[in-house]
Amino acid sequence: MFEITWCRAAPATIGHVTAFLWLVSLLFFVPAQEVRPAAVTDQPTYNAGESVRVRLAGVAQATASIRYAGAQISLAPGVKVTGDEYAVLWNVPADARTGRYEIDLAVSGKPAIRNAGGFAVHRKVAEITSVDLDKTFYASGDPVNPRVVVRNLSGSKLDHLRVEFTGYTIPWIAPLPDEAPRWKTLVADDLSLGPGEQKEFRIDKAAVVQAGAAPVVISFAVVLRDSRDTDKIYDLSFVPPAFTIPPNTPQPVQYTTSYLYRRLADLDKAWTYRQFYPSEFVSSTIHFDTTHTMFPAGVPIHIPFTNSSGALAQVKLLNEAGTVTWHKALVNEPEVDLSPLQPGLYTVLIETPSASNRLEIGVNNLPKSLLIFCAHEDDDTAHPGIIRAAIENHIPVHVIYFTGGDAGGCERFYLHTCDAARALNFGEVRLNEARGSLGHLGVPTEDIAFLGLPDGGLGQIWYEHRTASDPYLSVLLASDHSPYLDAAVPNLPFARDAVISAVKDFITRYQPDLIITGHPDERHVDHRTNNWLVVSAMQQLVREGKLSPQTKLVVDVAYGARPGAHAPYKFEKERLFVSGECAKLGQEATWYYQSQDGNHEQGEIVPYAKLPREEPYPHFRVLDWQDHAGWNEK
């Protein structure tokens, strides 16, 4: 219910009443917009051999047909479907191509509707059906006796299977050079399973708990491999965490890794983040424009400000050491005009007899254009300074993600082992997080692209699967072509040559002055292979005369160097001077990656004065990227 109050300022005329009634009719009788017909599948992805079932939304009846994304021709004759119930659209052949499929609709009396819906096809050969621990609470010295079930999902016999029980592990991240060898218990080796056969294992003393006086969380994993080629992983399952209980402790007091503080004693009782800005950066009368604090070196700098007191303002420029390098008195000027500055971190200080305020600015040699290649969604958090500097100075910036990040915390997100459908959806979660994080820095969505490669699979793509005719079948996605709806290259094969071709297309399209990738020696296989793919593309483009050999290449170090052979390149340390406001935006951008840090984004706030005034990870320029082709071949 609502009340209409008539205006008493003047008598209501017939015209006024008519206009009012017309307005009311708009409020209550707006015609419903026509809904675009859509095809709804009962699953987001189907294993080869399963049936795709579909129903309609927005239309009562239509003829549905399917296409492989990127193709023009339908795979089979259309099937009549309705909005009442799911109907079988396609029985997926055992040899069907994995990847993304689109559904087209033909509705009587209307133009054909392309891509009215879609689904993915995967091929999961074998799976770890379940893993259960015998207890939730363990004392030090207790044996761990798990139950593991594995199953052959294919229609053929599988031989040479290996089942391993081990501590929580990410197989594609190499251990640190001084890290102790990872333990594992062999559950089964050279195992054979017939078509559809399932086998259960109960393992006595698969591990022995070692814990001290404080309670800890313990986590385990099960890996299903090929015993002849241990790099070939069929499935990976993470066991829900268990707790240790020290003697005479009535209950566990340890939180799992999805919580901000592992122990209540770790709580930040000072609440220092509540006063984010130091008092010298806060004023009621002097205000800066904080949306532009990163500037290019060698050009005049203009910094808008307001001084509501009307008093004479003294302006000083301080260098990073706090030394005054420039001073001027300003009366009624709307901005501070600075002569060109050398790269560095500076502070603009404005003082009146009754107030003061200051603004940090970062000055750097900036590129004319920037192209960043990331292995995963959240790797962009290594580069907030250069990204924001590009945005503030209208420098073109594009960010490309190789993988969908489908394995990075998937089991924690669902509190369940990830199958192909969960992995695909989790990848979509991470894609959206990347859009949000980069959007916070000012990068528009149209300048962000995703290739949709498998998390943890870039090493296999580089070494074992060179051509599109022999793509890599990923572990969790169980696909050998990109299954993502928004993949930049529809159904990109998980093969080295195809990926390098896509990278070359991006570089040719954007002609970047600066390219940033991961370090070629990183412990995480995706990070180092990110570099290998990009550098290989760059070298090919130089030979083809399509890229200047003077293009600048910078790499970041996130995980540290892996053991073994290292890249033969010459490196030079790079420093980007990052203003406090830019560092603040970079910190906030990390909070969008909730899937990676649980609820950490709610409390991990570093105060302004303690934020680092450079990029979060070390950066190095590669001086001779044009050379040493083939050093990373087996």
Image (cartoon, helix red, strand yellow):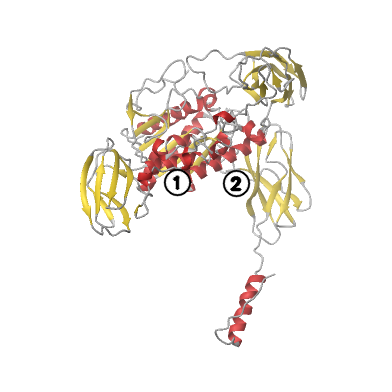
Residue at 28%, 57% (x, y): give it: 334
- x, y percentage for residue 98? 63, 35
The one nearer the camera, 241 or 151, is 241
Amino acid at circle 2: Gln
Name the quadrant containing residue 207. top right
Percent of width and height locating residue 58: 70, 57
Task: Give the foreground label among 1 and 2.
Answer: 1
The reply, left or right, for residue 343 in relation to residue 291 is left
* Residue 614, quarter of picture: top left
- In the image, 365 versus 121, the foreground residue is 365
Quadrant of res 324:
top left
Amino acid at dot 1: Val
- Which disc number belongs to residue 443? 1
Query: What residue sits right under mark 2 in the picture?
Result: 72
Front in this rendered view, residue 215 or 444: 215
Q: Earlier in the sequence, mark 1 or mark 2?
A: 2
Residue 440 in the figure: left or right of residue 36:
left
Give the alpha-carbon distance from disc 1 to disc 2, as whole Å: 33 Å
Where in the figure is residue 318, as x and y percent of width and height? 26, 41
Checking the image for residue 336, the label placed there is none
Quadrant of the rendering where the N terminus is positioned: bottom right
The x, y position of residue 584, in whole percent, is 43, 41
- The residue positioned farthest toward the front in the image shown: 354
Residue at 75% x, 51% y: name it: 80
